[in-house]
Amino acid sequence: MTNERVRTAEPARGGGRPGLRDVAELAGVSHQTVSRVFKDHPRVSAETRAKVLAAAAQLDFRPNAIARALATGSSRTIGVVSFDTTLFGPASMVSAIEGSARDADYFVSVVGLASPSRRSVAEAADRLRGQGVDGIILIPGHVPADQVVRHLPPVLPVVALAPAQTVASAVVDQYEGPLAAVRHLLDLGHTTVHHAAGPTDWPEARDRMRGWRDALTAAGAPVPEPVPGDWSAASGYERGKALALDPSVTAVFAANDHIALGLLLALHEAGRRVPEEVSVIGFDDIPEAAFFSPPLTTVRQDFAALGRRSLALLLDQIGAVGAPAAPAGVVIPTELVVRRSTAPRRT
């Protein structure tokens, strides 16, 4: 057995984090060889690569992202700036991006902002650039994406998960899903569909309301006044108590599944049976939707596809050579998932 194979790890010089030279000394190779291993250089033998990786594991060595970016021109790290990750939509977007990035051998660094402002966006971008990210995916929440990206450096590759004109964008279709939901209820014989709306300062809520209204108008059905509120189950419950008192209400489209959850409880407490007396449809298809009582008919957003497509758009920018192309836009379709919360209207 050679000396290299029986060496043991010693504390890094100066007692700090281990560096390339510490790994090189333990592996019995030059620090240039260690650098080549972590750059995936083709001219490194399998035996040497295994020896270096074993030494790195023993020392718990991890290549510094900024150093790697300086050496290779790429940190293989992307940044995500998101507003209000407590909500299902933004949280699911972040999770989908992280999964797609892992599949592409990229790291993700997330900065969550409580509220958007010129200063907070600029600070988030500076923080991520300081980490050596190759580009940023922006989840702007209720603020128009084009207003937010104005505060980002023009040389930084950016993709917005919201409609945008000035940067590439990837979005889930927020309009066609409500159209399908309302048509489903009308096809079941309901004469109209009430709407428990999301907060109107969110573009997603406005698009879902527009789809609901246009579907009713196209069918020549009455258009009830939408019931405003926020995205929460508590808001759905409060609005549900009012809707439950109106015997003419036989079908409701809720702007998200949490609103629908609160609505179901309010209807149950009022003695209005779902779906025998009132049909309810949500939007999102959260993991719990199939376990509501009754299981919720809803519009599914494909967040996995959104993660893949947004990452692909960003990597296209990162790898682009020459003048930037016109901003690209990708729209991901939704799917109506029919469960037991909708049924034909009783005559």
Image (cartoon, rainbow, N blue to C red):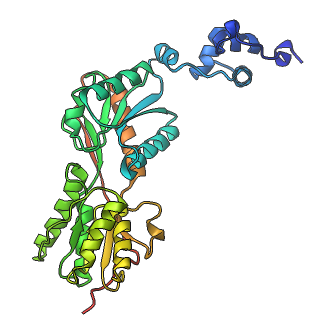
Q: Is residue 165 left or right of residue 256?
A: left
The residue depicted at 27 percent of the width and 22 percent of the height is: 153
Residue 42 visible here: no
Label tally: 0
* Outermost top residue: 14
The residue depicted at 61 percent of the width and 22 percent of the height is: 62
Q: Provide residue 21's location: percent of width, then percent of height.
A: 67, 9
Q: Is residue 288 left or right of residue 316?
A: right
Residue 153 visible here: yes
Q: Provide residue 159's location: percent of width, then percent of height.
A: 31, 36
Q: Is residue 220 left or right of residue 294?
A: left
Q: Provide residue 228's location: percent of width, then percent of height.
A: 21, 60
Q: Quadrant of the C terminus?
A: bottom left
The residue depicted at 25 percent of the width and 39 percent of the height is: 328
The residue depicted at 29 percent of the width and 43 percent of the height is: 141
Q: Nearer the viewer, residue 47 or 238?
A: 238
